[in-house]
Image: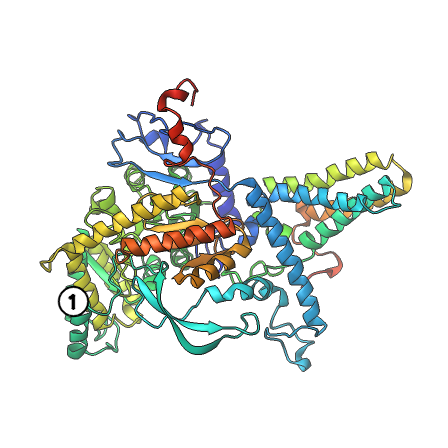
Amino acid sequence: MNVGTAHSEVNPNTRVMNSRGMWLSYTLSIGLLHLILLSIPFVSVPVVWTLTNMIHNLCMYLLLHTVKGTPFQTPDQGKARLLTHWEQMDYGVQFTASRKFLTVTPIVLYLLTSFYTKYDRVHFVVNTVSLLTVLIPKLPQLHGVRIFGINKY
Amino acid sequence: MAESPATKEADGEEVCRSLKNGLKPERNGSARSLHRNRKRQNDRRCQADEEEEEEEETTPQHDSLYSRPFTESFEETPMLVAVLTNVGYVILIIFGYLRDLLRHWKIEQRHIAREKEEQKDFVPLYRDFQNFYTRNLYMRIRDNWNRPICSVPGAKMDLMDRTSHDYNWTFEYNGRTMKDVINLGSYNYLGFAENTGPCADSAAQVVRTYGIGVASTRQEIGNLDKHEEMEKQVAKFLGVESAMAFGMGFATNSMNIPALVGKGCLILSDELNHTSLVLGARLSGATIRVFKHNNMQCLEKLLSEAIIYGQPRTHRPWKKILIVVEGIYSMEGSIVRLPEVITLKKRYKAYLYLDEAHSIGALGHRGRGVVDYFDLDPRDVDVLMGTFTKSFGAAGGYIAGKRELIEYLRSHSHSAVYAASMSPPVVEQIITSMKCIMGDDGTSIGCKRLQQLAENTTYFRRRLREMGFIIYGNDDSPVIPMMLYMPAKIGAFGREMLKKNIGVVVVGFPATSLVESRARFCISAAHSKEILDTALSAISEVGDVLQLKYSRRLTQNAPSAHLFAENMFEDIDD
């Protein structure tokens, strides 16, 4: 087990989202989450959709924008140690296919949630705030930016 | 230093995706412009699936560049398997975090290095996340690697018996050995890893004459007459003017590429090049651009763009352009498309560095490597590099080429100036084994071994294909990667094979890409047909238990193929 013995990829983390079946697995897991939440008794459908949206955005924020570095040692002496997974994707090149997909999915989920909650005001506020927490870190202007020093080291 | 990976990736990706002249790259990656007088060869299988996205690559037989059919296949991962592999990794990650939590709460034992209590407020010395993969995934299946061998690694070997009582964190040796384990992992292509026979005898004799160590570098007082003899032999073997040998194969690449190229030069290296080539390229300070694996269209695009646009900011012409490829890629089992690379190199006036670590001695009807395999002129390749570790049963590497190049390297290479020279018995092993392969020692052992290796390779590959496993690579390469895909199967396959007394090498993420973990078999001329048959039946059994037979192709000997006449489906358009 050694990073990069078989290929010249210095940081394999950059290619994880492009690997085969990743997009399908991701979509299926959102579906699975939704089904599990739907199985809870006495919870109405709008609440379930809002919960799906919130849990999905929370997990995405934690995994893509909070956890930093690589789970293995890379041969580039830790250049990516302070970068989140989103910043590591494709070595920081913006607007690649995976980045576009991961930006569009929360938006599609938000649109579905808005429809199924019948555009109720409380749900709208909650869902929009949740969507913004996940969309704003993906902006290219915020690449490498740590507001108020949160999550810097 | 070199340009950042961001630009490097952007160059490679964009360039190879949007071809400006509108030509789509061929499915098999060969550049269309190089095959002017080709004819399309029909697929011989009677049911060709269009939906199945496999990449079976066969260049036409009547092509002027290739003297023999070039069949490589990299069957696409089935989508269900890919999804299940990702699910497997997610479960492993969830359990990893759970166990980290248990370790934090001191419910479970903590084995990884930690800081002292009084240093907790300092900048952390050990980052917990940095070895998340190591402690939660690698440690659990660690018994498949670093197995201690206590005999010569020939066709069969002896392994030390080891057990672990704390889930592979520590191992205990109970003194017993597993005898006669079939060795499918050693790079022993021609079977020269032996401790009896003419090579071993002459090496033992040389120890008595010269001793073991040389105690100096080549430049100072460590240049023995044996070294000169060996280098002349290597040059004669390869058909070039002169050669130079170094003590370590990895160091040959990483220390000599900086001597050849520097700042202001361009290196075009294949996606799947070995770490030593990548390290040498990064140490040199040259600009590195990566082209898709064995994809000649991509390489041509990069070459023409490099010549047209020159260096990144100043647009001055590049001082040198060096194309770095390998003969056989050990993780894929694919062979480089050397005729096309040479045509491209001549057209665009670039230099070629060919790393024949796995292919020297293993390919070609005379065993002279990939240049011999394609019947090309070795003088077309500027720098021929190879190692003695794999087919010659020795250790070390060589660089061969024109006399001026080698004379330059003798004074400018780091290895020659600072590293100790090769040990005399190793040199003698190289000389004897090379004479044996060339037939100069009067026997036909070398010729027989080459034939045996080719037969073993074809047989093993054919049988594995028929059983339904997904095998990567060229039909003639003795390196056979068999896909496992799921992380749990990596550990399971290694352990089950060991229970059946067969030792295999398994590889997973991050040495390969996330989904494509594999077991890699290295076929040797020392394997007899009985050994191969034993191994194949064991692999088939384990493959049935673990459900590894993923291939969705119809095989030649599938029973259903005999029920229909060959011309029954001729009206279906391919």
**Residue pictured at 55% horizontal, 72% vertical:** B169
Q: Quadrant of residue B70?
A: top left
Residue under label 1, please give it: B198
Q: Which residue occupies the foreground of this view, B322 or B270?
A: B270
Q: Which residue occupies the foreground of this view, B168 or B510?
A: B168
In the image, farthest residue toward the bottom: B118
Image height of B201 relative to B547, above or below? below
Q: Which residue occupies the foreground of this view, B341 or B67?
A: B67
Q: Chain of mark 1?
A: B
In the image, farthest residue toward the top: B571
Residue B29 is situated, as x and y percent measured from the top left of the image, at 40, 36
Q: Quadrant of residue B407?
A: bottom left
Residue B418 is situated, as x and y percent measured from the top left of the image, at 31, 71
Q: Secondary structure at mark 1?
A: helix
Which quadrant of the rendered structure holds the C terminus of chain A? Answer: bottom right
In this image, B464 relative to B112: left or right? left
Image height of B255 relative to B315, above or below? below
**Residue pictured at 26% horizontal, 47% vertical:** B455
| Residue B316 visible, this orientation | no
| Residue B271 visible, this orientation | yes
Residue B391 is situated, as x and y percent measured from the top left of the image, at 26, 58
Q: Which residue occupies the foreground of this view, B332 or B462?
A: B462
In this image, B519 relative to A81: left or right? left
Residue type at numbered disc 1: Pro
**Residue pictured at 26% horizontal, 73% vertical:** B217
